Amino acid sequence: MPAVAQPARTLPDSLIYYWHQVYFAEMANDPDAIIAGYERVLELSATLPPSLKQWYRGTAFFGIAKANSLIGDRAATKELLDSALHEHFWNFDMIRNVPTFSVVLGKSFVDSLCTSWRERVVAQARTWPAQDPIILKPTKMIRGKKYPLIIALHGGGGSYEAFSYRLGDLPDSLNAIVAFLPGILRLSETSNAWGMNMEQCVPYVDLLVSHILADPAIDSSDVTMMGYSQGSQVSYAYALAHPERVRRVVAFAGFANSILPSEHLETQLQSMAKHKVRIVAISGDRDYSEFINTTKAFREKAKKAGVRFSYTIEPGLPHGIPEHATTYIGNLWRKEHY
């Protein structure tokens, strides 16, 4: 699979702000604030490239539909959910798992709607364009110099293109090459997930990483796996399977549900310690308790095996990356990159 360098890209600060704020509104189950936040996202994403605009619109319409289902507005819920589907929000498992959709619209209606749309999606999937890794490089590179590599893995139901825009300042900020990989599970033209099957995810990521490392400008001894949510779990799994390739893992809003039951975990952690792989995990104190608890359990097992594992709980942060991500990651980089 080819990996072609892309021009730098960023998102408007105002879009990042409202995207971040809507997390808090959702955690608080505040329908008015959810709707207001997502309506601003719809406005602010209007000038983005078409594929990116569609991903934000689909996600925003889905969020507004959920908010209307909280207040029992059947007509609005149905209309906004339909809008989300027409904007290619095709995460049918997520739609089915919203309990208020079944309460307001009826479970049979939701199931029928998802089944009908899934049939259309399956028919269209063969026409979707291929997804190659997005490679962002520093603006001013020195010939012959080797640069650290960051492998960035988005969250479930996310857009790796949107993730590359969210973190588009990192190459120049860190003087590093950043590769954004599409999740192994394809939900639409622009949306992907990783799922919970690490035995499938790890070989898939390794194949892409092998291609990326062929670039002579990359320092193969300085590779960081950086994930968000589902991408964090895949980052853990990859580093456990290939500690010889990874120098550190940076995990935002991660969890270790599929990692902890592994019968090979203790042996893998020992190998990780031998290769001196470091793990830095960051969660918000407003994140899901299961995610925080599994991360803590993973940290304890890792530390017992001799792995350097730091875990920070950020006050006021929900399930997300800190709003000023470039600054936050830059501070981590200067602390950990030596």
Image: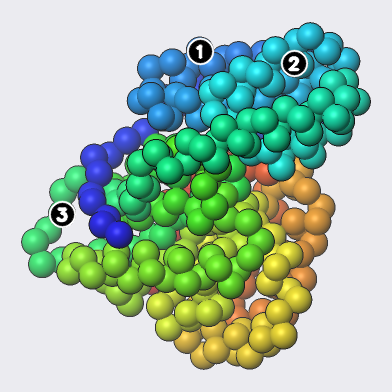
In this rendering, which labeled residue sits more in front, label 2 or label 1? 2
Name the secondary structure under disc 2: helix
Q: What distance separates the C-alpha of mark 3 from that of mark 1?
A: 36 Å
Kindly indicate whether the residue at mark 1 contacts the one at mark 2 (C-beta within 8 angstroms).
no
The residue indicated by pointer 1 is 43
Q: Residue at x 63, y 65 (%)?
A: 197
For this orientation, the residue located farthest to the right is 103
Position of 143 relative to 92 (above/below): below
Residue 179 place in picture, x, y as percent: 35, 55
Q: Nearer the viewer, mark 3 or mark 1?
A: 1
Residues at discs 3 and 1 in contact (Cβ within 8 Å): no
Q: Is residue 305 visible?
A: no
Q: Residues within 10 Å of mark 3 (few under 14, many from 20)?
A: some
User: In this figure, which residue is indicated by the disc labeled 3?
Assistant: 141
Q: Within the image, what quadrant is residue 304 found in?
A: bottom right
Q: Amino acid at mark 3?
A: Met
Residue type indicated by callout 1: Glu
Mark toward the start of the polypeptide (3 vs 1) = 1
- N-terminal of the pair, mark 2 or mark 1, is 1
266 or 201: which is nearer to us? 201
